[in-house]
Amino acid sequence: MDASSLFFDFSRSFLFTIATLLPMLNPPAAAPIFLTLTEGASSTARSRLSKKVAINIFIMLTVAMVAGHVVLNFFGISLPIIRIGGGLLVIATAWRLVSASDFDAEQAQDMAESYSWEQVRSKAFYPLTFPMLCGPGSLSAALTVGATLHDSSAAVGATKLAGAIPAVAVACFIVYLCLRFASQFLYRLGSNGTAVVMRLSAFILLCLGVQIVWDGLSELTISLLVEAAARVASYYFF
């Protein structure tokens, strides 16, 4: 196979991965929620946390893309179950944000002084990485991308994988930028405007969690109905 064909496969895999994963990650929408979950944290703590979240997302998406189907088949877990479980986590996180009380300046300052690296690490995976950013939707998208990497030619498959992994890295870098500079993005809104955006984003996240659970239940119901119909057909016609 010539170099031009390999470059075409590389470029197509790169663009397809970016176009599939980035809308699911949706880092701009996660920025206000990130600020809410790290209320009182210093700029340094948020910077370190943003970096760790981006690294976690890169690892999760890469593993899901390369070996996700193998892991799910090994444990006997279906995608609808992943959606339902992850959606419930999203709902729990969003509900806590929606019903949380507002912090005053003195409380925020006290939290900033005591916001340790242990707190940063404890929040880096749950709920910031999973399920807020890298939730069931993002993992399903990564599994979809992984399915397109398989090819009868080893060279083509390797080229597609070589294009997909840098695309995941670029998407995670965009996540890092949006989280790292979230406070600067929302600075012009002021305290009241930022509070409104945070509450609205939390409500949207709550609706997204309900939608994810609904999608999982719908897929599970459809699969059960199809299986039941197949058994009835086999009973009457065979």
Image (cartoon, grey):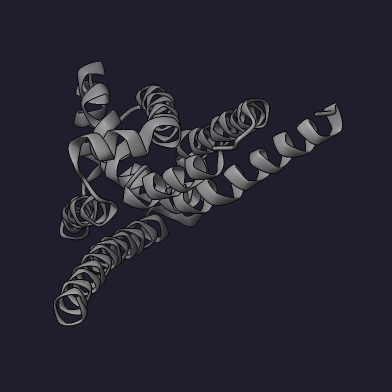
Quick check: 67 above or below 199?
above
Task: Report x, y in % for residue 103.
Answer: 21, 47
Is residue 38 in view? no
Residue in view at x 26 percent, y 17 percent:
117
Q: Nearer the viewer, residue 196 or 53?
A: 53
Q: How many marks?
A: 0
Q: Residue furthest top?
A: 117
Task: Report x, y in % for residue 195.
Answer: 34, 57
Residue in view at x 49 percent, y 38 percent:
175
Q: Quadrant of residue 214?
A: bottom left
Q: Residue furthest front?
A: 238
Is residue 220 in view? yes
Q: Nearer the viewer, residue 53 or 81?
A: 81
Q: Is residue 69 left or right of residue 115?
A: right
Q: Quadrant of residue 44?
A: top left
For the C terminus, the image quarter is bottom left
Residue in view at x 42 percent, y 35 percent:
61
Q: Quadrant of residue 35?
A: top left
Quick check: 203 above or below 134?
below
Q: Nearer the viewer, residue 31 or 222?
A: 222
For the N terminus, the image quarter is top right
Residue in view at x 42 percent, y 44 percent:
143
Q: Nearer the viewer, residue 213 or 102?
A: 213
Task: Report x, y in % for residue 87.
Answer: 23, 56
Q: Residue furthest bottom?
A: 236
Task: Report x, y in % for residue 142.
Answer: 45, 43
